[in-house]
Image (tube, coloured by chain):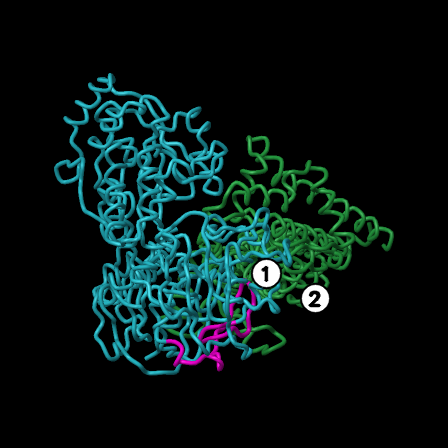
Chain colours: A green, B cyan
Amino acid sequence: MIPYIIRRLIAAAALLVLVSIFTFSIFYLVPRWAGATPETLATRYVGRTATAETVALTAERLGFNDPFYQQYGNWAKTVVLGGEFDMGAQKVECSAPCLGYSFITRQAVGPELLDRAPVTFSLAIGASIIWVVTGVSIGVLSALRRGSVFDRGAMIFALAGVSMPIFWTGLMGLTFFAYKWPIFVPGGTYTPFTENPLEWAHALLLPWMTLSLLFSAQYARLTRAGMLETMNEDYVRTARAKGLRENRVVFKHGLRGALTPIVTIFGLDFGLLIGGAVLTEKVFSLNGLGKYAIDGITNNDLPKVLGVTLLAAFFVVVCNLIVDLLYAVVDPRVRTQ
Amino acid sequence: MRNTRWRVLAALGTVAALTLSACGGGSSDGDGDGGGASAKANAAVSGVFNPSDKKGGTIKFANSGDWDTLDPGETYYGYSWNFARLYGRSLLMFKAAPGDASNELVPDLAEDLGKPTDGGQTWTYKLRQGVKFEDGTEVTAKDVAYAVARSIDKETFPNGPAYFDAMLDWPADYKGPYKSKGVDFSSAIETPDDSTIVFHLKQPFAGFDYLAQLTQTMPVPEAKDKGAEYRNSVVSSGPYKFQDLQPGKSFKLVRNDQWDQSTDPNRKALPDQYDVSLNVNADDLDNQILSGSIDVDIAGTGAQPAALARVLNDPALKAKTDNPTIARLWYTSINPTVKPFDNIHCRLAVMYGMDRTSYQTAYGGPVAGGELATTILPPQIPGYEKFDLYETPDNKGDLDKAKQELEECGQPNGFKTSMSFRTERPKEKATAEAFQQQLAKIGIEVTPKGYPQGDYFAAYAGNPPFVVKNDLGLVANGWGADWNDGFGFLSQIVDSRVIRETGGSSNTSVRIPEVDQMLDEAQVELDQGKREADWAAIDRRVMEEAVIYPGVFAKSVLLRSDNLTNVFVNNSYGMYDYMEMGVK
């Protein structure tokens, strides 16, 4: 097991390097291939009445005059060894791992990511608990009551949940349940868990429910399909024939077998969500990683984009590793293999 | 099957009912008591809505994006200049008053307007006594000089205005106090004593008082300066100081106990506190203003389309809006470097042929879009003269006249050209399509071409070789003045000397040597009345060359909160005045 984990972590590190090179290339090389010069790249980061000299200074400061490999090398060196940044009146030290300073806001990217990560984690964890519990429960019940009123209603709910876009459900949720009937708090409200857990939960309840509506629908359908398959397996018939209670048959034998694809997809979904539930954060004005990424992309702010991309890639890899390890726990058949 | 169908219909019906009630039923949202004044549309455009001197309370601002920077030496947005007066005092400021009165400059940190000598090449200001920073130290002329000097360091502050850099007589190779530490810059700025500051310009400039109102003249204590990081720890010289600044998220302004009302005739400083949230979803922000949980959308550019539809169709909500015209022109450049627009008659064919009302429609109509424009200068600019050199019936174009002009320019059957627009701006795309549809009637085939906004001027529409190579005879464009004055509005869009072969200028089409000379003469005219007449003459001269097709003067629909007092539109910023507001 340990060698397996180590091999996976080494592969993850290699993947992160590849992701960083790829992101760097998109930012630096693609515009160049389209004919951009260091000066035209630099004009994004200067004022509207900037002189040619200001543009040239900015191009130099941001490294646009250097060859691609040198720019990447400088960045990688800063990540591994840290670096010093010139703020004019003073130089500031950025210790490793240093993800640089935003081209636009001149704020250090690393601390900003750490500051925003709890918001995204809070959103992802809360929503994932809700969507797994509701989605799996609905899926199990639908499978057991196949063809019933409940089953049909649940599948309509699944269809609606998948069809309604988050930016609509989110805004509708705020309009009705935060402003018209003030049950929840307005957008942009976030209290850290460490400050007040109750307020933290209250502020996030509407975003959790909105985000989980999309995913629980998918999980309901997935669980239903998996349950329908496993409940027809021979071993389930055997369990019933042996006189086991129906609850035990369903949960210990039926659901467990159906969980494998759910665990797989959960790993992917959760990992991606940690990279930022972009639309949910945007609609509810939550200052998480997703919003940070969007701001970086919109403003061509490479350090921000690189920072979030690497963090998201890291979490996708880690979550998938955890999922792979969980297979053995969830499905006894994997253990015996 | 029948049961399922009915259930689906019931579900869809529920969804539709919820949607319709959310969209339609806004009359009870955020209504409550109208307070001391009953709500009325446009009540704050030319007057003060809900006047009051009541102190106390907290005003809640929200910004749909991030602040560019809180550093007064670099910030370059109108809303930021408007707001910065709460924590900083520049030498002069625009009068806090509704209507045209707000175009008047009044002294703030200075005792009086600037005293020009040497024909306007030297400007002297005397500072008020007793103005202090938030730490109790007295503000001196050296702090103002230092603030201006640091702002010209374009390596550290690349985003701010470049006027001081360009106009003051800095020593050769002077790069600001960080990189040219200890270098004497008295050739540009002198401080003969603690309360006198003298600016020396390279050339006379009659409008220097407008530079003196820029936030770059807000004093900065050298000992507390942190360069690019100063934005996170700005030292206040105004009635409020920063508290709990979380970059990218929020900050508060609380009372600065070192601010002395007796030194400040301009500010009432009514609220106890300002809470500012950043990066709030724009649509949600409008909803929050209507529901009362936020008081002001700080960007000041007006409601989003979703809220507009709701607000304009509900009389109760519409009564809480203000619809000012702002000093911004949306226009189309007609490039004489692109054939056949090198012939003025081909340009005149466009001037007569285009339907200006379709331009207005593309921008959102007469309320949310803009007012029809026939001049370059907007009405808010002192010296504005209304004229229309190319009158057409109901502003809908005159196809017969346009065809005559086509004959004159040797293109009786029309010709082909392209029009650029910024792909992120649907209104510009709609404008390009309006040109395409209208000009097709006279045989001019316009191909709209979208380009990214980020380097629209640097790499595409403002890059002269690219323009010629890609046949961009028409360019969707727009301009808002840095301040409401002819120089502030015209200098960057009609002066041919700002055009660079490497690109980057908003002026893509005006290359008239006579206009350059007229600009030079106007800039040194110390008589304000004559100077304003000069700007009007420049406007007319440029229009005579038919290189700019004015579309609309921008309008915005501002949402007015029930919680506020002293609400009025300050024309110099084109939005509510943030300095004078109070809480009910």
Which residue appears at 46% of the width and 33% of the height?
A: B463
Report x, y in % for residue B182.
64, 59
Q: Which one is earlier in the sequence, the residue at label 1 or at label 2?
A: 1
Magenta-highlighted residues = B236-264
Horizontal relation, residue A323 to residue A105: left or right: right
Tag 2's secondary structure? loop
Is B553 in front, or is A155?
B553
Is residue B451 visible in this depiction of the protein?
Answer: yes
Please give the label number shown on residue A244: 2
Is residue A152 visible in this depiction of the protein?
Answer: no
Which residue appears at 76% of the width and 57% of the height?
A: A96
Label 1 Cα neighbours within 10 Å, binned few <14 / some 14-19 / many ≥20 = many
Report x, y in % for residue A279.
50, 55
Residue B39 lies, with reference to residue B284, above or below; the image says below
Question: Three-letter amino acid code at disc 1?
Answer: Val
What residue did someone put label 1 on?
Answer: A136
Which residue appears at 77% of the width and 45% of the height?
A: A14
